[in-house]
Every structure is written in structure tokens, then in C-alpha cells.
Image (tube, helix red, strand yellow):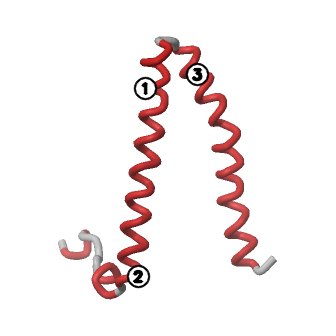
Amino acid sequence: MRSLLLDLTPLRQSRQFALLFSGHAVSQFGRQLTVVAAPIQVFEMTESTVAVGLLGLVQLPFLLTGCSWAVCWPTRWIAGG
């Protein structure tokens, strides 16, 4: 049963890792909140599903370039190129 639980030892042993982990968690929570709130706000302001769709269309290029950058950059960094 104990092997199914999360090992929190790194969070207890390293203050820097705990700060990094908690900062990342707060950042991800805020990002997900924005992903949900922006379309709701656009719909409430315009009452148009087309405007909500356009918002998604505007966000798409940034999502795709961000994803490709997030995949390529660490690979180059690890490979040393």
C-alpha cells in the first residue's frame, strides 16, 4: 500500500525544490484558470459563440509554436547542439 503513495521526501529535504514545485503548481493553476475564464468572459461580453471560436483560433498559433519550442529546445539543450 505504501508504494502507491507519492514520495514527498524531495519536497521535505530540499527547500529550493519545494519552492520550485510550489511555484510551478501555482503557475499551472493560474494558466488553467485563464484557459477557462477567457472564453467565458468573451461569451458574456459578446453573447456570440463565433467570438469564442475566434478567440480559440487566435490562441492556436501560440499554442502550436509554444509546444514545438518546448519540445525542440530541451532536446537541443540536452544534446549539446
Q: Is residue 16 above or below residue 55?
A: below
Disc 3: CA contacts within 10 A as few (<14), some (14-19) or many (>=20)? some
Image quarter in which the N terminus is found: bottom left
Q: Is residue 18 left or right of residue 57?
A: left
Which residue type does callout 3 highlight?
A: Gly
* Image point (38%, 58%), residue name: 26
Q: Earlier in the sequence, mark 2 or mark 1?
A: 2
Disc 2: CA contacts within 10 A as few (<14), some (14-19) or many (>=20)? few
Q: Quarter-wise, where is residue 80 in the image? A: bottom right
Q: Earlier in the sequence, mark 2 or mark 3?
A: 2
Q: Distance between the residues labelled 3 and 1?
A: 11 Å
**Residue 53 - label:** 3
* Image point (36%, 86%), residue name: 14
Image quarter in which the C terminus is found: bottom right
**Residue 2 - label:** none
The foreground one among 58 and 76 is 58
Which residue type does callout 2 highlight?
A: Gln
**What element does badge 1 sit on?**
helix
Tell me the residue that label 2 is attached to.
16
The foreground one among 31 and 70 is 31
User: Do callouts 2 and 3 mark residues in contact (Cβ within 8 Å)?
Assistant: no
Q: Quarter-wise, where is residue 17 in the image? A: bottom left
Tell me the residue that label 1 is attached to.
40
**What element does badge 3 sit on?**
helix
Q: Which of marks 3 and 1 is nearer the N terminus?
A: 1
Which residue type does callout 1 highlight?
A: Ile
